[in-house]
Structures are given as C-alpha cells and as structure tokens.
Amino acid sequence: MDTTSFDPGLTQQYTARLRRIINRDGSFNVRRRGTRLRDIHPYLHLINMSWPYFLATVVLGYIATNLIFAAVYSGLGPGQLLGADAVSGVAGRFLDAFYFSAQTLTTVGYGTIAPTGTAANMVATFEALLGWLGFALAAGLLFGRVSRPSARIGFSRRMLVAPYQSGSSLQFRIVNQRANSLMEVEAMVMLMTVQGPAGQLKRTYDLLKLERNKIFFLPLTWTLVHPIDAESPLLGRTPEDLERLQAEVLILIKAYDDTFSQTVHARQSYRYDEIVWSARFAPSFEFSPEGDMVLHVDRVGEYAPLEIAERQ
Amino acid sequence: MDTTSFDPGLTQQYTARLRRIINRDGSFNVRRRGTRLRDIHPYLHLINMSWPYFLATVVLGYIATNLIFAAVYSGLGPGQLLGADAVSGVAGRFLDAFYFSAQTLTTVGYGTIAPTGTAANMVATFEALLGWLGFALAAGLLFGRVSRPSARIGFSRRMLVAPYQSGSSLQFRIVNQRANSLMEVEAMVMLMTVQGPAGQLKRTYDLLKLERNKIFFLPLTWTLVHPIDAESPLLGRTPEDLERLQAEVLILIKAYDDTFSQTVHARQSYRYDEIVWSARFAPSFEFSPEGDMVLHVDRVGEYAPLEIAERQ
Amino acid sequence: MDTTSFDPGLTQQYTARLRRIINRDGSFNVRRRGTRLRDIHPYLHLINMSWPYFLATVVLGYIATNLIFAAVYSGLGPGQLLGADAVSGVAGRFLDAFYFSAQTLTTVGYGTIAPTGTAANMVATFEALLGWLGFALAAGLLFGRVSRPSARIGFSRRMLVAPYQSGSSLQFRIVNQRANSLMEVEAMVMLMTVQGPAGQLKRTYDLLKLERNKIFFLPLTWTLVHPIDAESPLLGRTPEDLERLQAEVLILIKAYDDTFSQTVHARQSYRYDEIVWSARFAPSFEFSPEGDMVLHVDRVGEYAPLEIAERQ
Amino acid sequence: MDTTSFDPGLTQQYTARLRRIINRDGSFNVRRRGTRLRDIHPYLHLINMSWPYFLATVVLGYIATNLIFAAVYSGLGPGQLLGADAVSGVAGRFLDAFYFSAQTLTTVGYGTIAPTGTAANMVATFEALLGWLGFALAAGLLFGRVSRPSARIGFSRRMLVAPYQSGSSLQFRIVNQRANSLMEVEAMVMLMTVQGPAGQLKRTYDLLKLERNKIFFLPLTWTLVHPIDAESPLLGRTPEDLERLQAEVLILIKAYDDTFSQTVHARQSYRYDEIVWSARFAPSFEFSPEGDMVLHVDRVGEYAPLEIAERQ
C-alpha cells in the first residue's frame, strides 16, 4: 500500500446518497461542528476574508475606537481639551472630542484641539500608543493580504479521455495565467470513488500515476497525462461506471514562485460529468510570422472531439 | 541502524527513578543550566512570551522611555519647552515634559507644548527618531506574534491499542481544529523507553513505523496507525510492561498551511497511562440528510471499548 | 522516461524557422495573449517593475491623492480650513488645501492649517486613516523590493567543450558575485533542440546529466561538467550539428542564501553559437604571498584554447 | 564518485604553503577581487553589518538628510518658515530650518515652525513623503535584523578520536544554546586535505559519513560520530599525518526553528590541531534529586583523556 495517500478515517460506511465532496475549486465540502472559539485564529480570519469585509472591518474599527475615546474625553468634563470648549453644547463637544481622538490615534496632531488637563493628557498619551500599535496591525494585515503568495493556475474546464501510445489516457491541461515565472511545478492527482455493496458504500482514494509529475518551468501549457494502463484504477471503466462510482478527481499543483520567493499551491477538482471521452486538446500556442511563440492563455481548455481532431 | 533517529547523547545511564521527560504538549522536560546572557535572543523571548507579559512590556517600555525623556527635558531648565512654563512647580513642569515626550515619541506633536531652546530641540529631534524605530520594533513584534504560523491540531486524548488486520495496532487520531486547509500532512512517532539492569538504566528511542505517514489533505480526521507486527518494539508488550519501561510516545506533525504559506509543526506526547487497551475510535463525522459531510471536531478523541464497539 | 523533465505541451510541430526561445537571462521568449485583467496581480507588478517606474508610481500616487483631497476640501467652501482662508483667490485656497491634505495624509499635521468645519474634520479623519494604510502599503512594497532575495550568480560567457577523462565534456562555470554565502547549491541543465523531417520539426528537451549537480558551498568558482558519454544526447555531435538543431541550453541554479534565509534561484541560457569547442577554463583564483586564496570574480568566464591551455 | 560534494574548481594545484582556508566559524578565508559595485546588495550589507555600524548609519543618515533639507529651506530665503524668522542671524535660521526638517521627516509636526511660502510648502510636502519611505526602510531593516532567524549552536571546542564499537571514531558534540526548540536537525561533515607530490599539491574534499546524520529533536546534546572504518579517509591516519595533510573539517548544521518557522544553519570548522586523540566526552547532563533532567549547556565541550575516562 502506498504510504503517501489520503485517508480521512478508517470507518467510512455510508447509507445515504452523497453529494459532491470536493468543490470545483478543490476545497472540501465538509461542514465543521464542535469548534471552540479559541480555535479561531483572528489573523487567519482577517487574511482570508473578502476585500469589502476587510476594509469595512478596518473602517468600522477605526470609527468605533474614536467613538469610545470621544466618549472618554467628553466624560472628563470641560477644561480638558483646549480649543474644544469654544463649541457650545454636548454634541459639539463630543464631535470635537471625536476629531481630537482621530487626530491622536493617527498621530496627525494638528494641535488646534489639544489636551490641557492631566486626565486628557494621560488618555491621549495612551491613545497615541494604541494608535501606533493598531495601525501597525491594520497596515501589516493589509500588506499581508496584498503580498500573499498565490498562483493563478488556469485549468482546462474538462478532463479528456484521449488516446495515448497504444491505449488511452486521462488528461487535463494547465497554464500560468500570470506573467511571472513558476518553477519546479509538481502535480498530484487523486481519484475518489464510492464503492461497495448497497448500504456499505465506502469512499476509496487512489493516486493516479502521471506520465510525468514534475516540470522545471511552465512557460506555455502543460498537459498532464494519466495513462490508463494495467495499474490504473480506471482501466476498462465506462462513463456510466464513473457516474455510478460518483468519481471525483482532485488535483494539487505545487510550484515555486520566483517573484514571491515561495512555494505556491493550486487545487482543482473534476467530477465524472466533467470528463469528455474521446477528445484531444487543441494547440494553445502558435508561431508569429517572425518565428516567436505566441501563447493563448485563454485557450488552455480548448479541445476537439477525436474524429475531428484526427482529420486535422 | 536507522540514520534518522533521536539520540540525545551516547552516555545515558541512570540510577534514579525518572520523571516524565516529554510533557503532554510535546516539549521536553529539561532544565537548562550554564546558558550565557548573550545566548538569549530578545526577539525569540518577545515572540514566545504570553500576551499579558508582552503588552505589559510594551506599555512599561513606553512609560519608562517617556519618564527618562521627561527627566531630560525637565533637567534642561525653564525656557526650553514652549507652553510648559506657564505651569508652576517642578511637578507640573515634569508632567508637561512627560506629555511632550509622549507627543514626540509617537510623533503626534500637537504643538501646544513645543521645544524652543536649542537643547530641547536637539533632544526632541533625537526622540522622534527613536520613536519611529521603537514603534517600528513594537509594531513588528506585535504583527509577528499575530501572524506567526501555528497549527492547531487536535489530538485524541488517548492512544488506543486496537485490532488491525490479523493482529493489533497502536492508534491515535488528529483533526485540524481550524477551518483553514492543511496540506501534505506528515507524521513522525517515536517511542521512548527506559531499559536495562538496575542501576544501568538507559533511555532507548525507537521510531514507530506507521501504516501511512503522509496524507495530502486533512479535511476530516486522520487516524494514525502503528501496526504492532514483528518489526514493532511493542510486539508482545503488556500494559504492565509499558509502565515498567516508563514508555512515552512523542509525536511530531508537520503540514503545509495554505493561508500562512508556510510549514507548521505540532507536537504531542502520550505516556503509558494514556494508552487504552482494546478500544476503537468512534466515527467523528456523519452525513446530513442532504448528503453533506458533517465533521465533529470535538469528537476527535471519542472511542469505545472493544466489546461495545464490536456490538455496534 | 524521466519523470522530472520539461514538456510545454504534447503537440509541437513547427513549419516556420524559429527564433531563440530562451533568452540569455534564462527567461522564455513567449508572447502571451488572452490574459484577463483580473489575472494581473498588482503586487507582482509593483515588485517586478523597475526602480524609476516604482518611485514615479509612488510619487504620482501621492500627488494625485493630494490633488483629489485638495479638490474636496476646496469644494467644501470657505470656513472649513482654519488658516487657509487668509489666502485670497481660488488658486491660493486650493494650494492651501493641497498642503493641508499632504500634512494630513502623512500625519505631519503642523496645525497652521487645520480643519474647523464638520465636513472638513470628517474628511480629514478619513484621510488620515487612508494615509496610514496607503503609506503602509508603499512602505511595505519599498521594503519588499529592497529585501527581496536574489542571487547574483556570475556565469561564464561561453560554454566550453573540454576534455574530460578519456572523452570530452560540456562545461560552464559559475561564481557568486556577492560576498554573502550560498549553501547547498544545486544545478539543472537542459538541452533543447529542434529535430525531425522538414515541416515536421519538433522541439526536444533533454536533461544533461552532470558529473556533480550539488555542492554544499560556493566560496570560489564551480565548474559544472556534463560528460559527453554514451548516455549524452551530444555524443558525436559537431558544431554544425548543434547549429542545425538550433541547440539551446537552459540552466537553473538553486541555492540557500544564508542572509535572506531563503532559497534563491538563477537562470541562464547558452545557444549553439555561445559554445567554444576545444578550450579549457583558466584558473580564476590564485594565492597571495601570504598563502591566502584570492578569487577573481570577474575571471569566471576566462578560458584558453586547448592547444594554448595544454602548453601552459 | 558522490554527486553531492564540494569542489571549488577543477584546477587546484598549489606550490605555496597554504593558510587555513576555513575559519573557525565555518566561513571561508577567501579574498574577493574583481567584484563590481552593482554586485553589492545594499540590503545584504545593512543586514549583515554590526549593530554599532548599523545604528550609526541610521543616525548619520537622519542627520545628513536634515542638514540637506535645512540648507534647502534656508536657501529659500526669509518668509518661508513661520516662526523661524523671529530668530536673528543665518545660523539661527539654519538651526530652525533643521528642527523643522526633523519635525517634518519624522511627521511630528509641532507647528511652532511651519511652512508658509509656496516653495517651503512644496518641499515639506515632498519631505514628509520621503520621511515615511525612509523610516519605513530603516524600521524594516531594524526589524529584519532583530527577527532574522539564527541558530546559536554550541560546538565542543575539540573534536575527539574516541573508541567506537571495535574500532575508533571521530566525534564532536553540539548543543542548542538557546531555549527555543530545534527540530529535524541535520549535519554534514566534510574533510579537506592537501595532498600530492611537492609542487603539485591539490586540495581534496571528502564527505565524512556519520553514524547518524539527522535527529528529530535537540533537547540535550548530540554527539556526532564518524566511524573510522574501511570507508573512511581517516583510516590508519596518525596525528602527524593529519598535520602534514593540513586537515580541516567543515561542519554544516541545518535545523528547523519552531519560533522563527524557518530553517536555520550553523557552521563550524576544526583543524588538525583541534583534534584530541584518545578521549571521550564527559556527560553534560545529570538528574536532579527529583528525577528531572538537568542540562549543562556550557559543558558541551567537556571531555576526559581515555585512561581517565575508562577508570571512571
């Protein structure tokens, strides 16, 4: 038995009809229960959340902090903030305290409103410290989000069952959608099926062996080929078989990104109904009249049915 | 002899009764002597200390720095700080110098207190530089702490001796307590025993071979299985044997964290009295009526005695 | 078939005369079409752009942001900015609003111009937040550019066909052009040729086996040697053969950089017309009278024709 | 021939008496010539320089920048800086311009000196931008220096030739001088000798095979053992042989640091005159009365001559 495999548990017997468990983007369709609050990592949360939510969190956090400090400064009574007392009324004083708080938190400090009383000075001293630390956190998170290594690998929309040597093969094709260079690109392809007698269905996981599982560079497209030979769990399977087995294919691509100086990962999944039988990928690059290679990034998934492909 | 093993030294003869040397969290119970001050790395210290200590360090450092500068500004005599001389008394002047220092260090600079004398201007020029560098350090440390890669792997509270094929096996189970995805999860399991004739006790370290030591993804739980076969140092051992041998098991889990884009580690230890004989892990996930997988993160350690488990 | 190789696609038939596809610096001469705007990663773009463009982007972004905010403050009408109303004329007020914006964005906040109206205060509160985040991004990018790991490996200008044992070999030489230490230096050398009958030309990729493909340190120079033996695709080839095959050699060097604490990569390419036949590299280091090694970094590419080299 | 080895070049013939080429700290004693200015990486330089130099660079850079801007502001003539004109004399005005520059660069901006003229405002707008970027760089470098991963591995001062099984072995011992945990510690040991007929001396590099070259944890000490067996280049060598061969041993230790979440390296070198023949390392840890392990970090190098060691 291969020691590098996947097995989410020993007991895997199902009686119910199962949904797709691997989403198109390669993530797992698993609902999590019983997690405790202390297992939530704020950084992970803030790094993974969408941009609108993140920016809203920062802006609201900023406003909330200023409201709290404005309430504190107001609560200290008159005579604490120079330049704020001229304003008559509680609302006006609160508003000035709010501006002052923002000027302190961001360390702008115009000085038109400034602390005079001991209490206000003490609070402002603390708020400026808090401002530094808080903005450092916000800024670090912002930059962490922007600079987070990520590969944008384009996958063909379909897997193909295409001829290969004397037999056939399962193929898909990838391309680097960005212009930066990826090196030492590695792939892992896993087949998941649900098998067994009725009421005793078990998920089975098989690694699909690739004709080649690593390339040094990815300047053009890379067609990944799993030969359907005697060792393959797909040998002799028909499209109907794969549907019955609820076959899903999970793909993990790993590469070294020269710009981020880090390893990046990409995942993808295909289900039985995303496999096209008897087809071949069409070329995705051509040569300009000057002899230069021209890559069409958007044609990574183009294919032609076998009869048509053969005629060409 | 296996070249990848663990051996803390060649001479390991004990006469005394020994305490547990590996703590529950996988750290070693070793007291260190003879370390020099220059071997202490301030960054390691500040990154590893608890949050209350860290925040206290930052706040106290801030206050101390301001006190020092307040003393300096006060010591320069009157006429150095504009706006501070109106305050009568040494205490009042010191307090104003303190506020001024904080406003300079944080670069708030309201200007209601400002340097006029050459000396105060020079000191303030230097203090603002120090402020930038100091806050940069504090902010970097704060962000470093928050963004530090860490896996929160949940381990079953007990190891089980469970049936495996025709024989038995030592098992434990892990789960990712966080919702982020871990990939290429690897495990290493080491058995530590104290053996030998009385007065000549020696610690022995054995790697326990796993049925599978790497999985590509950890969306659910992973049951790690050490088959107790002819190669296993546990073959034929009874619970009494393990207690006599003061058996401890050390586990190292290594995984790639997709959010941190880094490799993370987790450690855990089990002692002989944390091994349950003849039991089996209970399933920790189920299927919702809609066919979705539902994982109960908090049930990673659930097991049933073998007789009960068999009956189910 | 070697599983670690290079294959940019399955269909590689050419009819046209082809240009060099690997540039001297190891990058691929591929034009990309069909990329979508959302595949552009701003960070990658800003990290990879040249220094003049980057600095211009920062300065222009700063000026543009200030112009926008100056327009906003001006648009709020008079009485909003204290100290700016003394200036007569729209241009003067706009200019003051511009200065005020810059003082707010950078959090300098002199206070000679300061917001008094509610609207101006609100905008300034937001602008100071934006300033913090914007400068954090700019600063992070600046530091990211400066601290980006990069190896500066010097390659010999030519590859040599030099005698090796009883046969001959293809050689090139590298040196670390920087004084920092590189460890665990690894090399990969690939030969690319265009072969086949007219109108059916196909690119072929072969890994060239090295006598040694990894060294632990690179304090001096390293001569990489591909023995032209029975396994080599170069056996029996003449200079004319290599030109007809449009031979290009692609080199990838990987090393651990002790200062950056990261793995760094360097690439290089040689074409058939950059190979010198029957030559030998000249020593690039010597010994000082005191017995010290002296390395001449700039002599990494020095060689002598074989007859001359032999005579020495 | 082992493909993972060290060979700084093919031609290595010496006629002169040679100095030690590997320094005690594992760095190479090589003088570099012919490097170009553009090969100097400012970041590498600033990260590697000593603390006093680094701090002096920051402070002097700060002062120099302020002097330049002070000259610019002074050069703009009177009426440009509010609050600075009260001071009579060129020196006084320059000094005020200097303070103003510092207040702008650090974004303190008290406002007691503030720009009024268009020219001064423009320069200040630019200086505040420069301040942000400059301090970001300085702060990043400062934090980069502080947070730079580094292992402090303690090496025994001497290598020992100690008995091993039926023969003998070359040994040295290491300890982690810091309290943080190192994992997956790997070692590489290389012997360098100068051999050959007079006037034709050549440096030879041999990897010394270790009884064990990797351990999972380093909580105590680790004694690294090279068995002097039939495969060893040291078999049958005497102390006089090693001196004649100018033997130097280079050691590279690689480990994963749990706190830095990075791989760290340490190097060390021993020369023939740092090898002690017929000795044995003394235990560096003991047990407290309570049964706890007590490690004496400073005793990593302690050893006893063999006769004495045997008697114990």
Image (cartoon, coloured by chain):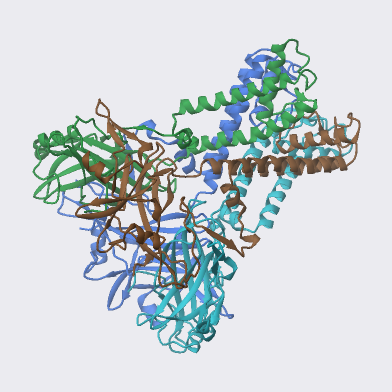
Chain colours: A brown, B cyan, C green, D blue
Q: Which of the 4 quarters of the picture holds residue C280?
A: top left
Count of numbered circles in the view: 0
Q: Residue at x 56, y 31 (%)?
A: D61
Q: Quadrant of residue D230?
A: bottom left
Percent of width and height locating residue A2: 34, 67
Left or right position of B104 against D19: right
- Would residue B100 appear left or right of A293 to someone viewing this image? right
Q: Where does residue B38 sit, x and y in percent of width and height? A: 54, 56
Front residue of B105/A141: it is A141
Tell me if residue A127 comes above or below residue C94 in the rendering: below
- Specify the quadrant that holds the N terminus of chain C: bottom left
Q: Is residue B18 visible?
A: no
Residue reaching furthest to the top = C89
Does residue B250 sit above or below B306 in this rendering? above
* Looking at the image, residue C63 lies above or below residue D53: above
| Foreground of the two, C33 or C136 | C33
Give the x, y percent position of residue D141.
53, 40
* Residue at x 57%, y 36% (from the top left corner): C137
Q: Nearer the viewer, residue B95 or C90?
A: C90
Residue B289, visible in the rendered structure: yes
Q: Where is residue D128? Give x, y as percent.
A: 63, 27
Quadrant assignment, res B153:
bottom right
